[in-house]
Amino acid sequence: MIRGFTFERALSWPFTAAHAATFPWIFAAAYALVLILVYGVIGLLAADDFVNWFSALEAADASNDPDEQMALAFGGFARLLPWSLLGGLASWIIWAMFETASQRRYIRDEKFSLGFGADEARMMVVGLLWFLMGLVVIGLPLALVMGATFYQLLTDPIGFEANANSQQVALQVFGSFLALLFVFPVYVFLATRLAPSFGLTVQAKRIRFFDAWNVSRGRFWPILGAFVILAVAGNIIGQVLSGIMQAIMVPVLTNLADAPDGDDLRTIVFSPQFFVPMSLYVFGILFLQGLIQHVIGGPAAFAVRHDPRGGVEEQARIGAFD
């Protein structure tokens, strides 16, 4: 193991890496602004479909016919599916852009910059591989255990509701809990061992997903421990601040809940009394989310800088003698 890698240095790396006084705050503010802008545009374009779905849900709630309820709810949602797919693609691209900017700071000591190029395209592939890993390790076992329940819910919702307390459903729910209890530690292990893949891809300028296993060898507990401490501390702070902001937003949200129909809903949503405080609230939540995303990526990136096969720090140490 390279001498410079320690748990303490990995834990403090987000706060001691280059541009520590400015980068995290610029990163978080840009993250919030970009997401608000992109999803604001998507929301404006999809406003009519959202209002129609809201009206369909109200109609479904007023109906006593289960078939009509399902038709209204799913029929309205079908119009939102293309917007959901567009939002998913936008999220993938935006995540790659900001994760790449984050890793460039940690790995290359670069200032904050945002764009889309080869680094970001490679990061999208690494993110996709990461998603597929989680799908296989967690999603697939849970789907197999709960498959019969999901099938009954989709094909016979009335029968499912009638048998909701049956022994079969109870056993399937208990089985899904046991499956999650088994597969979650496996996922944590794999996620920790492969966490350096993001920084390694930026450093090598090519996709290096499974090669991250070599970087994290012998460093599992320091990387995991630093990540958990940063994630738990960040989420506690985030929950406290989010709770304060939610309490401030209660009167605003009450006006939205009292909207009797779609037209009134549109009027309230686009009124300054609702739009301005809601925008500030969303900005605050996304700012915290972006800040936490950047900070918790530090320990794994620090391991990349101290790659046992010759990382950034080792190359700098050797260069000092040239």
Image (tube, grey):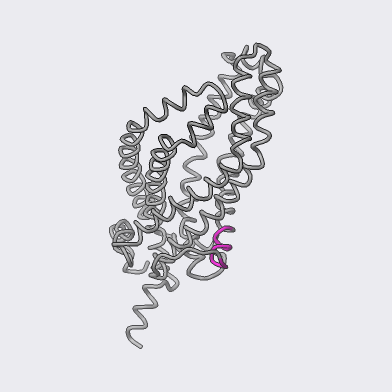
Residue found at x 53% / y 50%:
38
Q: Is residue 151 above or below residue 133?
A: above
**Which residue occupies the extreme bottom position in the image?**
322
Query: Which of the two residues, 211 or 208, is positioned nearer the viewer here?
Result: 208
Q: Position of residue 63 (x, y in %)?
A: 64, 14
Q: Is residue 293 above or below residue 158?
A: below
Residue found at x 55% / y 24%:
173
Q: Position of residue 212 (x, y in %)?
A: 49, 61
Residue found at x 37% / y 66%:
1
- Residue 240 occupies which quadrant of the picture? top left
Q: Is residue 1 above or below residue 258?
A: below
Question: Is residue 123 magenta-colored?
Answer: yes
Q: Position of residue 89 (x, y in %)?
A: 60, 50
Q: How many marks?
A: 0
Question: Is residue 147 magenta-colored?
Answer: no
- Residue 242 occupies which quadrant of the picture? top left
Question: Which portion, as a residue range, is magenta?
Answer: 117-124
Query: Which of the two residues, 161 or 37, is positioned nearer the viewer here?
Result: 37
Q: Viewed as shown, does residue 204 lie left or right of 220?
A: right
Query: Which of the two residues, 255 or 233, is positioned nearer the viewer here?
Result: 255
Q: Viewed as shown, does residue 130 lie left or right of 313?
A: right
Query: Which of the two residues, 41 or 170, is positioned nearer the viewer here?
Result: 41
Question: Which corner quadrant holds the C terminus?
Answer: bottom left
Secondary structure character of the magenta stretch overall: helix
Q: Position of residue 160 (x, y in %)?
A: 64, 17
